[in-house]
Amino acid sequence: MKIVPRQWLSVATLSALLLSGAVQAGGAGAPPVARPAVPAVQPAQSQAQAGRALLDRALKANGGDSLRGLRTMQQRSEMTFVDAQGQPVLVLVSVDYANGWMRATTLQGEQVVNEQFLTPEGAFASTPQSGTVPLPRQEARSLTDAFFYGAPGLRLGGEGRDSVKNLGEQTWLQVEGREIKGTVLEVVTRGVKATYLLNSQGLIVAERYPVAGLGEVISVYGDFRTIGGVQVPGTTLGFAPNGVLLFVAKDLETKLNVTLPADTFKVPE
């Protein structure tokens, strides 16, 4: 295992890792195979109705009213990038869902490697070497997009969506000889597309999302447990679309709806 030496740990990744449904999984897999089961031609109205019904089921399965009432989150996770020799990093994340603020701190040992902030003043990155600088537009957009990924992305239910579609049954990956498959829910909100793979109960089995600097990532969730009424994965495996394992994340602690310290989102000078 080795740490990738660049600042890609945007909350676009982290939010998707933290609060989604799960499936027990491990190891690298074969390239994903998509097998849509929906008819090749489906009336838009029928697809939208099926999508709304699937969205309602997913919201209920992943937290229901607890997701709708989600205000804040604090989480500590250990992320390890796949390589021959590295060490894991500790990622500390605070999110204010009501205001749309975030802070993600990455540490190697006790040393801060980088921090990312999304505040009313804008999006920023801070490192011991470079100080605080505005994030490039693409990475800043990744932070704002992150509010619509993962189980927290379901919290609005059907409100304010650009579109909601049920894309039918698909298989995305082979993981240790087991297919990662389910029903695909596509939700577009304010131009941000979230693509979920749901099991028969509506839990989020996996998710596709873009990461600045990496491209598309498929996260497969495992070891989930209920925290504050929300389904939270204990482990996450991140794959490239060709099935190559990119990273492993372990949730060390997650707290929901806690009072965040006043200086949580204060950007360093």
Image: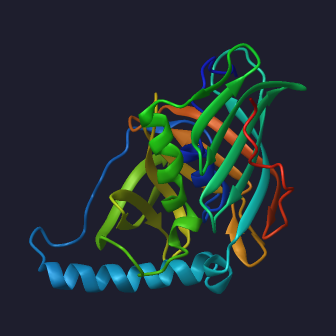
User: Against 125, is 38 above or below?
Assistant: below
Q: Name the residue located 57 percent from the left edge and 53 percent from the top edge.
A: 16
Residue 171: x %, y % from top left = 37, 56
* Residue beneath the point at 77% across and 18% down: 128
- Residue ranking furthest to the right: 110
Image quadrant holding the C terminus, namely top right
Q: Is residue 8 visible?
A: yes
Res 155 quadrant in image? bottom right
User: Where 87 sits versus 188, above or below?
Assistant: above
Answer with left or right where residue 256 lies relative to residue 10: right
**Residue 132 vs residue 264: left or right?**
left
- Residue 262 in picture, x, y percent from top left: 84, 55
Residue 70: x and y, percent?
68, 73
Query: Could you tell me if residue 177 is visible in this image?
Result: no
Residue 260: image quadrant is bottom right
The residue that appears at 50% across and 40% down in the rendered structure is 140
Please say which color scheme the image uses.
rainbow
Residue 224 picture location, percent across and down: 71, 63
The residue at 40%/80% (across/down) is 54
- In the rendered picture of this protein, how many numbered marks are placed on residues? 0
In this rendering, position of residue 191 left or right of residue 194: left
Q: Nearer the viewer, residue 40 or 70?
A: 70
Q: Is residue 174 left or right of residue 264?
A: left
- State the quadrant of the N terminus: top right
